[in-house]
């Protein structure tokens, strides 16, 4: 009997050690969703005894309850007061479960929260936003996609307090994502790098321009389905957001060649400005993904100029980073991969280092260095821009 008791004790200790690795490990084993811990295992472990519960409650920083299909609201009300050290909390739902008092409880106890996923929380109102504004000011990543009840007033209030946001998903927030809300982001969230505004039909040029001027660190902006925006939005992003690498313009049918040439123009100007500081690394900056599907006002010359200026934009099979679905008139546009064998290039040296630069329509004769090429290209684009603007 004593031997059996000792064996059970050893098994229990071994189980506890494995659970601790799961709960507080490096996310490489046993976890899910990029290291976010499985809530079912944590809850089972915390119910074994008070010692286990206390150890887990004091150390757990990442938790996902997205597996809970029916009682997530009650579960959050029970767990939030215990897991006060949480930094990441995933509450993604297949059907709406969360209510405002659950989010208010989170905000009341989890003040270290940095990453919160409340996507598809259709029942939540502005009361949840007010609670998060006061209780979780350190949020850097927030996903409230599909939260259709939030208003622009509530979002504007949230942004006044949560100024550390870097990643924000407002996709489908048709009531809340307006120019007023975006102006609030522009005033307060200067560190923002990723913003999803997909299918937010109330977003217009005023809001996007406010974003561009207030959030110069933007790298990814999804404006798919924002049918009201015009060239002015793209021009503002091109002028003010030099680190932009991904732009979604699906079904933005007011976008014309003027927007495309503004991206090209600023690409060349940025290359020239960065030449001395970055040398051969300037290709690391610039668009890597662009969706202009259903943008039927665009013409092949403008889109081809864009594709030529951003080497990371591909139309070739398996690398579609320039998406043009529904634009049958743009079928002649191809990335460098498709025409590389037929496009002449030339070699030259800058400070003893070899470079290969595509012609971009320029003649090799008389070109002595890269600055000459880029300056000449910029002059040509300036002339093109003037023609388009006029």
Image (cartoon, helix red, strand yellow):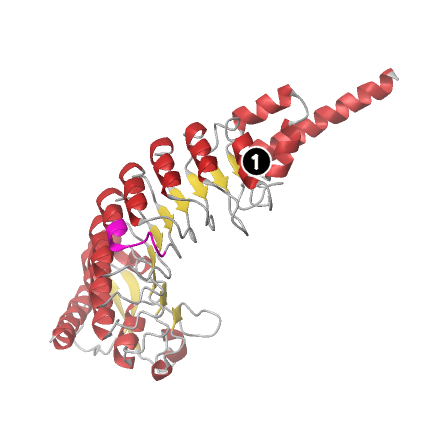
Q: Residue at x 68, y 25 (%)?
A: 48
x and y percentages locating residue 67 in the rendered image: 60, 45
**As drawn, which residue projects farthest toward the top?**
2
Q: Is residue 64 visible?
A: no
Q: Residue at x 34, y 54 (%)?
A: 175
Q: Residue at x 25, y 54 (%)?
A: 179
Instruction: Read off the magenta span.
Output: 174-182
The answer to whether 262 appears left or right of 194 in the picture is left
Residue at label 1?
75
Q: Splitting the image into 4 quarters, where does residue 3 fall? A: top right
Q: Give the vertical position of 360 relative to 62 (above or below).
A: below
x and y percentages locating residue 156 in the rendered image: 28, 44
Q: Residue at x 27, y 78 (%)?
A: 297
Q: Magenta stretch: residue 13 in it? A: no
Q: Magenta stretch: residue 178 in it? A: yes
Q: Splitting the image into 4 quarters, where does residue 362 fall? A: bottom left
Q: Quadrant of the N terminus?
A: top right
Q: Quadrant of the C terminus?
A: bottom left
């Amino acid at each position: 009997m004593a031997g059996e008791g000792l064996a059970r004790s050893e098994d229990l200790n071994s189980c506890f050690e494995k659970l601790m690795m799961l709960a507080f490990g490096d996310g490489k084993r046993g976890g899910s969703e990029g290291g976010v811990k499985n809530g079912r295992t944590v809850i089972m472990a915390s119910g074994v005894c008070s010692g286990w519960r206390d150890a887990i409650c004091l150390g757990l920083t990442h938790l996902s309850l997205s597996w809970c299909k029916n009682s997530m609201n009650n579960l959050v009300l029970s767990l939030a007061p215990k897991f006060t050290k949480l930094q990441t909390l995933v509450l993604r739902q297949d059907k709406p479960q969360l209510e405002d008092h659950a989010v208010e409880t989170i905000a009341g106890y989890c003040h270290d929260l940095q990453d919160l996923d409340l996507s598809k929380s259709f029942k939540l109102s502005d009361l949840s936003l007010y609670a998060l504004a006061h209780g979780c000011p350190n949020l850097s990543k927030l996903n409230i996609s599909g939260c259709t009840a939030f208003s622009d007033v509530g979002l504007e209030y949230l942004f006044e307090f949560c100024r550390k946001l870097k990643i924000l998903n407002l996709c489908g927030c048709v009531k809340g994502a307006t120019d007023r809300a975006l102006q609030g982001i522009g005033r307060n969230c200067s560190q923002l790098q990723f913003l999803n505004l997909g299918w937010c039909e109330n977003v217009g040029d005023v809001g996007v321009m406010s974003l561009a001027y207030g959030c110069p660190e933007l790298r990814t902006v999804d404006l798919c389905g924002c049918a009201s925006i015009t060239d002015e939005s793209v021009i503002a992003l091109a002028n003010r957001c030099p680190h932009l690498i991904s732009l979604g313009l699906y079904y933005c049918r007011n976008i014309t060649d003027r927007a495309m040439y503004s991206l090209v123009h600023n690409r060349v100007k940025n290359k020239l400005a960065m030449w001395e500081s970055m040398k051969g690394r300037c290709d690391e900056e610039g668009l890597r993904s662009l969706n202009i599907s259903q943008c039927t006002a665009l013409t092949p010359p403008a889109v081809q100029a864009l594709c030529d200026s951003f080497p990371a934009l591909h139309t070739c099979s398996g690398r579609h980073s320039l998406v043009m679905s529904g634009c049958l008139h743009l079928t002649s546009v191809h990335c460098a991969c498709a025409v590389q064998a037929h496009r002449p290039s030339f070699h030259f040296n800058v400070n003893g280092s070899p470079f290969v630069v595509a012609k971009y329509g320029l003649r090799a004769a008389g070109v002595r260095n890269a600055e000459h090429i880029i300056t000449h290209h910029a002059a040509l684009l300036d002339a093109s821009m003037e023609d388009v603007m006029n």
